């Protein structure tokens, strides 16, 4: 009976998280820039049954390299729901499932159901996870739950059934996304941490670590063979243009506090230290994962945007030990009658430190990152009133929106892997928006066969007015609001 | 007993299939019948005999002539295939002290290694060098020192540097019981490694190296080294592994010897790992399957890369339009194809010519410079008549230097072929 009640609460938490996500996600009918890339990949599968391997629109036509598993899953749901709805609903369900996994993990870590339920609730409202996986049909909505499910399986693997599950999900995660490497590296750090502390993790776990590392690396090489051949070890930089590479891996500590949650960080770190001091094997696993993410972030091998998502969940899990210790400590003090008041205050602070930033960042993200109705109207006009093979100049942040909504070719977008001359194109696009010289602009317009110039307000604020578009002999103004659109006529 | 016999038979058949696959597949995958790579063209041209008047617009033939001599009498494809088979047989015979499983695994790992695929599919002299190295080792192991000596002498006619290395290995073999001499030789070897040559940064074929080792091979070895680091029986092998690894980072052909040794070590580790007590048989079988699949994938991927490699028919079609005896400037990797086609090149990948560094610097300046005066100066110095450019070169050189001048400075240059492969006439 008691179990039933717990599960009911857990399902309620799941529904609260899902409903909140859906409330935000359906505030706009549009997607963020990256969401349109996913949509095009899914639509292509729905139309042809095959993944898109040569993208005619991106970079004026280029080969694309990715694992299409996630897109096939979305396309499957798209068969019944339509791709637009599937891309909003299904990822929200995927990431909301995380609450069940976090509950299971927390319960294994401290064996306290109430605390596990509270941690599960917290995991649903981590600001960075909530905002980064909201309106972009992000693949991380599936990667994150699966990775932590693997952690869950690995923690108590003791029979053939669990081994088979671990094997299956290891393969699944590797096929889904290269982030699977993060889990493998986490396991390596777990092994090192445990060895240094003299903890025997057991032969079976060692075998599973070996298997996971080998299978993950093998599958990544299989899928990304071409990228490895092309870039060698530099593949970790993902062919990111030099112009943004410097800032791409920058970690802002203040935003880290807001986006992960101050109390989550404090309690999480206390939990890890406590776990290591108490030599708790299960905390070494979470500690290994946290350590691997921190080291990769520190070495600038992992984008903070992605690393912090995994880190925040791992910290929430680690926080369970600190909270458990805190509760036990309260029980031992002379003021047990104040225990409930203390708990309410601490938990209230936790909720505040997560829910408030989540609400703030989500609203801001929806306002700033999702194109507004007018921008979509303009792009639909371009779609309907221009030849099929025209090229539209747009800043990097609008690349997928142009190809996704207007269905036109672009000079560059954020899908850098195997894209041609990303650094050169990035600099050229920057030059086009910032130059005062019409000759320079025309030279670049000819170089990339540009037919339309798309100038969003953000670009004008950044570079000032694009002066060379004043030449009416060469550029015909089509839209003059925000955004501005000019057609090249000379 | 019956089952064991049939397993052994299957393993042997598997090796035969594997060797046929990896020796024939690159050729079958090619869209043309042209030999792979560029260096074989030099040997094929020199097989005709006479002085070298085309390479670097004429130079002394300083390379050992044994390989050229063989190419004069036997077709390249046949020669490579036969050499591959004989090398494998010798390799098998050298591994006499090992068990049959270890021997078969060693052979399997060697066949799928990028080094083996390169050696016996690309017509460089290293293939025959390795064959005779194996012959020397085989005779030494079987105490047939005279035959080993004869093989070594033949090696000197194929490649001096490889022969010297094998001579050094032979000395190590002879003096391995005399500690002082043995240590002295090893110290000499280490000094050589750290003093001569340049460190190679990329030695993994899956990460783009032309001649390298498989990433999975390396991964497996590193993993096993961690696992068996304290196994006494492997300790001397770790020393050899380290020495050969360092050597392969310094010397081009070192990677072939490293790969030979790596194959044996991998087989030993593979058997050791299999004998270990595993908690889960499923995990054990899957792990071994992944290792084998990884090595196979690496090899096949390399085969595909070699098969689709340069040169193409179009290069020679374009070169045919240039009159014989003229000087053609192109990328360094195209030099041997230019001279094979009867034209003089400005540079090629056999860089053992006097003042090569000076020439390299000037030609790199030519490629990168937009200064028309300096460009003319360099082109005149090397008496260039034609410039050949294709899409690969355009991508490699970028359009900031010489290609910019070709595009915008019509004075002095005229495009005589305007297709995928462009040829420009330079008027001095």
Image (cartoon, rainbow, N blue to C red):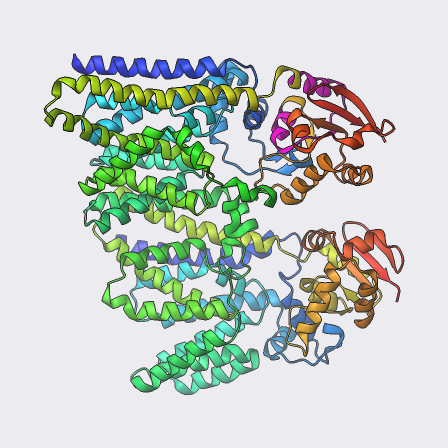
Prevailing SS of the magenta stretch: helix
Residue B321: percent from the left, percent from the top? Answer: 83, 60
Q: Quadrant of the C terminus of chain A?
A: top right
- What span is colored magenta in the figure? A376-404
Q: How many marks?
A: 0
Residue B14 visible (yes or no): no
Relative placement, left or right, of A460 versus B118 is: right
Indicate whether residue B139 is drawn in magenta: no
Which residue occupies the foreground of this view, B325 or A327?
Answer: A327
Residue B280: percent from the left, percent from the top? Answer: 23, 43
From what the image shows, is residue A33 above or below residue B68? above
Residue A221: percent from the left, percent from the top? Answer: 47, 46
Which residue: 76% across, 74% down? B57
Q: Looking at the image, which residue sits at the far front?
A: A334
Image quarter for residue A106?
top left
Which residue occupies the foreground of this view, A273 or A236?
Answer: A273
From what the image shows, is residue B195 above or below residue A116? below
Relative placement, left or right, of B160 versus B192 is: right
Which residue: 48% across, 82% down? B151
Image quarter for residue A341?
top left
Residue A98: percent from the left, percent from the top? Answer: 35, 24
Q: Quadrant of the N terminus of chain A?
A: top left
Which residue occupies the foreground of this view, A30 or B266?
Answer: A30
Which residue: 30% across, 26% down? A101
Residue A335 visible (yes or no): yes
Which residue occupies the foreground of this view, B75 or B207?
Answer: B207
From what the image shows, is residue B279 above or below residue A371? below
From what the image shows, is residue A87 above or below residue A416? above
Image quarter for residue A35?
top right
Relative placement, left or right, of A140 versus B325 is: left
Indicate whether residue A388 is drawn in magenta: yes
């Amino acid at each position: 009976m008691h179990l039933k009640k717990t599960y009911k609460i857990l399902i309620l938490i799941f529904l609260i998280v899902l409903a909140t996500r859906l409330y935000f996600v359906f505030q706009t009918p549009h997607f963020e820039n990256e969401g349109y890339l996913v949509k095009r990949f899914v639509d292509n599968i729905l139309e042809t049954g095959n993944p898109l391997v040569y993208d005619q629109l991106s970079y004026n036509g280029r080969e694309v390299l990715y694992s299409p598993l996630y897109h096939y899953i979305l396309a499957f749901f798209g068969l019944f729901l339509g791709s637009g709805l599937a891309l909003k609903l299904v990822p929200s369900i995927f990431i909301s499932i995380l609450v069940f996994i976090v509950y299971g993990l927390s319960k294994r870590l401290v064996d306290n159901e109430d605390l596990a339920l509270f941690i599960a609730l917290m995991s649903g409202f981590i600001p960075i996870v909530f905002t980064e996986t909201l309106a972009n049909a992000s693949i991380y909505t599936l990667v994150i739950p699966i990775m932590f499910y693997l952690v869950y399986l690995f923690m108590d693997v003791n029979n053939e059934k669990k081994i088979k599950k671990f094997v299956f999900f290891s393969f699944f995660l590797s096929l889904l996304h290269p982030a699977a490497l993060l889990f493998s590296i986490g396991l390596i750090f777990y092994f090192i941490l445990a060895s240094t502390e003299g903890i025997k993790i057991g032969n079976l776990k060692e075998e599973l670590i070996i298997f996971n590392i080998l299978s993950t690396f093998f599958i990544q090489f299989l899928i990304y063979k071409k990228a490895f051949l092309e870039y060698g070890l530099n593949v970790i930089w993902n062919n990111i243009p030099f112009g943004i590479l410097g800032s791409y891996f920058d970690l802002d500590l203040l935003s880290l506090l807001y986006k992960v949650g101050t109390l989550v960080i404090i309690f999480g770190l206390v939990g890890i230290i406590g776990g290591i001091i108490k030599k708790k094997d299960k905390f070494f696993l979470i500690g290994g994962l946290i350590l691997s993410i921190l080291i990769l972030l520190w070495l600038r091998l992992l984008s903070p945007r992605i690393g912090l998502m995994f880190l925040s969940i791992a910290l929430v899990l680690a926080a369970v030990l600190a909270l458990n210790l805190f509760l036990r400590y309260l029980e031992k003090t002379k003021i047990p009658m104040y225990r409930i008041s203390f708990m309410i205050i601490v938990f209230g602070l936790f909720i505040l430190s997560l829910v408030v930033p989540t609400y703030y960042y989500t609203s801001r993200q929806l306002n700033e990152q999702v194109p507004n109705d007018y921008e979509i109207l303009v792009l639909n006009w371009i779609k309907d009133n221009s030849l099929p093979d025209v090229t539209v100049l747009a800043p990097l942040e609008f690349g997928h929106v142009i190809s996704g909504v207007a269905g036109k070719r672009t000079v560059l977008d954020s899908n850098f892997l195997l894209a041609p001359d990303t650094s050169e194109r990035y600099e050229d696009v920057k030059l086009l928006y910032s130059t005062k010289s019409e000759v320079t602009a025309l030279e670049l317009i000819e170089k990339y066969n540009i037919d339309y110039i798309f100038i969003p307000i953000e670009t004008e604020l950044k570079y000032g007015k694009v002066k060379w578009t004043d030449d009416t002999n060469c550029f015909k103004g089509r839209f003059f609001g925000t955004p501005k659109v000019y057609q090249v006529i000379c | 007993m019956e089952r064991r016999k049939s397993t052994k038979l299957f393993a042997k058949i598997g090796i035969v299939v594997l060797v046929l696959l990896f020796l024939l597949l690159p050729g079958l995958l090619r869209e043309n019948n042209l030999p792979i790579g560029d260096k074989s063209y030099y040997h094929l041209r020199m097989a005709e005999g006479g002085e070298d008047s085309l390479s670097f617009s004429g130079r002394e033939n300083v390379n050992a002539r044994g390989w050229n001599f063989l190419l004069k009498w036997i077709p390249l494809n046949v020669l490579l295939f036969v050499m591959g088979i004989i090398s494998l047989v010798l390799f098998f015979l050298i591994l006499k002290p090992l068990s049959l499983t270890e021997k078969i695994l060693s052979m399997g790992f060697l066949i799928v290694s990028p080094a083996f695929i390169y050696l016996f599919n690309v017509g460089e002299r290293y293939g025959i060098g390795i064959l005779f190295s194996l012959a020397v080792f085989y005779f030494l192991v079987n105490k047939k020192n005279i035959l080993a000596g004869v093989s070594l002498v033949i090696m000197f006619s194929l490649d001096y540097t490889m022969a010297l290395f094998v001579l050094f290995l032979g000395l190590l073999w002879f003096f391995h019981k005399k500690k002082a001499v043995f240590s002295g030789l090893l110290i000499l070897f280490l000094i050589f490694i750290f003093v001569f040559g340049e460190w190679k940064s990329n030695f993994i074929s899956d990460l783009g190296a032309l001649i390298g080792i498989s990433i999975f091979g390396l991964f497996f070895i590193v993993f096993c080294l961690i696992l068996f680091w304290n196994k006494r029986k492997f300790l001397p092998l770790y020393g050899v592994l380290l020495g050969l690894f360092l050597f392969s980072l310094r010397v081009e052909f070192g990677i072939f010897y490293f790969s030979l040794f790596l194959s044996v070590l991998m087989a030993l580790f593979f058997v050791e790992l299999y004998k270990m007590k595993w908690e889960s048989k499923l995990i054990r079988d899957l792990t071994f399957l992944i290792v084998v699949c990884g090595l196979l994938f690496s090899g096949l991927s390399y085969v595909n890369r070699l098969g689709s490699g340069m040169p193409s028919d179009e290069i020679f079609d374009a070169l045919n339009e240039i009159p014989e005896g003229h000087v053609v400037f192109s990328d360094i990797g195209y030099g041997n194809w230019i001279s094979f086609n009867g034209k003089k090149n400005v540079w090629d990948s056999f860089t053992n010519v006097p003042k090569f560094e000076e020439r390299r610097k000037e030609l790199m300046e030519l490629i990168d410079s937009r200064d028309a005066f300096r460009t003319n100066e360099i082109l005149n110095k090397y008496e260039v008549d034609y410039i050949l450019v294709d899409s690969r070169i355009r991508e490699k050189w970028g359009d900031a230097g010489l290609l910019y001048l070709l595009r915008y400075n019509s004075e002095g240059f005229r495009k005589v072929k305007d297709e995928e492969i462009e040829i420009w006439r330079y008027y001095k």
